[in-house]
Amino acid sequence: PEVTNHGRATLASDIYSLGVMMWSLFTGDDPWVCGEGGFFMPHPTFPAVADLPADTYPTHMAYVALMNRCLSQEPSQRPTA
């Protein structure tokens, strides 16, 4: 979000980008879709992830927890490299 909003790339914005890639790998969807007039817009479910089934592997839950931290709107809440 910082790059789009302020034109600045930072370590935190790189971590957000990692979260975007993690989301795409986990859901199998593209995070951006073509909207009206050919403009890209966020996928309707991005960055939310549907509730995981009760029989979900613990590694999936850990993956989603890390992904959600990477996708935090607040840069200081994201993991550091």
Image: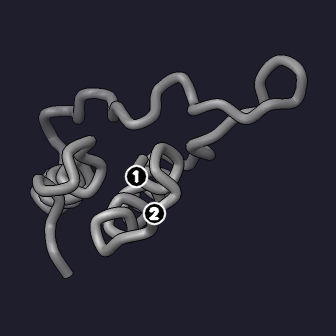
Q: Residues within 10 Å of mark 2 (few under 14, many from 20)?
A: few
Q: Is 58 left or right of 1, judged from the image as shown?
A: left
Of the residues shown, which amino acid type is indicated by label 2? Arg
How far, Cα to Cα, is label 2 from label 1? 6 Å
Q: In this view of the protein, which residue sits in the foreground, 62 or 77?
A: 77
- The numbered dot on residue 8 is 2
Q: Which mark is residue 72?
A: none
Position of residue 67 measured from the top left corner of the image (x, y, whole percent): 26, 55
Name the one closer to the observer, 55 or 14: 14
Location of residue 59 (image quadrant): bottom left
Q: If you read the primary sequence from the N terminus, does the residue marked by circle 2 or circle 1 appear first?
A: 1
Q: Is residue 52 left or right of residue 50?
A: left
Residue at figure coordinates x 15%, y 51% from the top left? 65
- Asked if residue 57 can be seen in this view, the reply is no
Q: Is residue 44 above or below residue 70?
A: above
Q: Write the residue at 18% across / 53% down.
A: 69
Where is residue 1 shown, x and y percent of the image? 42, 47
The location of residue 9, given as percent across then percent down, is 44, 68
Residue 2, label in figure: 1
